[in-house]
Amino acid sequence: TSTFEVIVSTGSFTTTAVTTPTITVSGTLTGLDYFENNGPSQEGTITVNGINLTADITAVSSDFEMSLTSGGTFVSSLSIPQTGGDVSNVTVYVRLKAGLTAATYTENITFDSGAAPQQLVNVSGTVSQDVPQITVGGSVDNLIYFDGNGPSQEDTFGVAGLFLTGDITVTATAPFEVTLTTATGFGTSVAVPFGTGSVVFTDIFV
């Protein structure tokens, strides 16, 4: 029995280690909003990575603040420690800080570490005026009955309010009537108590 052996050259190759200090930040920051005197905003998150670093990463903001823990202590200047030159998938929590006046706030949060190119993350949030406001949701229709067989069946819509200084008064134009309780208490108007200044969505029966 004969054995044939074929030797195939695979060529040559070399490897080059990447040594450039690099910071990478991923994720988007949205919905960082609140009403005046009701801050801070809810939290948003971004993810930070780094390789070949020679120093910890420092993140700096102005109107926004950051933490490495959800619900933790938030600061405007945050240090993200590196280990052996690396930062691996560190979550940074960001929120619009409390005490700001009504306006839209936009800035770049900066991420620095020694010789690594600086990274900028754009973030924006809005503080809205805490003026009284009422929200109405839903529609009312099909209030039908045959002559002499009224009233009609009920339908509902909802009302809610923020920063109120008094009850919400809902008034119906004749021949319609309203109440806060199904099947009873119908009249030309009804008062929705405002409590401590706000009203959660409340059903109005029509």
Image (cartoon, rainbow, N blue to C red):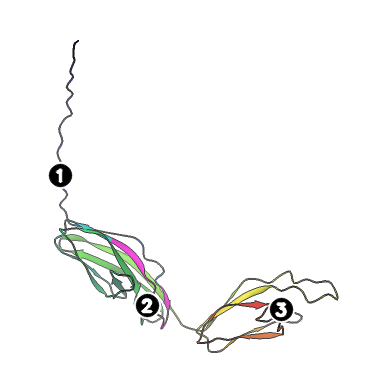
N-terminal of the pair, mark 1 or mark 2, is 1
Which residue range is magenta in the image? Answer: 33-47
Q: Is residue 93 above or below residue 132?
A: above
- Mark 2 vs mark 3, foreground winner is 3
Query: Mark 2, residues whose alpha carbon is within 10 Å: few (<14), some, or many (≥20)?
Result: many
Position of the C terminus, as image quadrant, is bottom right
**Residue, disc 2:** 40
SS at circle 2: loop
Question: Is residue 50 found inside the magenta-colored segment of the image?
Answer: no
**Residue, disc 1:** 16
Rounded to the nearest angstrom, the CA distance separating label 1 from label 2 is 47 Å
SS at circle 3: loop
| Labels 2 & 3 near each other (Cβ < 8 A) | no
Is residue 38 visible to the viewer in this orientation of the structure? yes
Amino acid type for the residue under numbered disc 1: Thr
Amino acid type for the residue under numbered disc 3: Ala
Locate residue 23, reporting x and y percent. Answer: 23, 59
N-terminal of the pair, mark 2 or mark 3, is 2
| Labels 3 & 1 near each other (Cβ < 8 A) | no
- Front residue of 163 and 105: 163
Q: Quadrant of residue 77?
A: bottom left
Locate residue 145, reporting x and y percent. Answer: 80, 72
Q: Which mark is residue 183?
A: 3
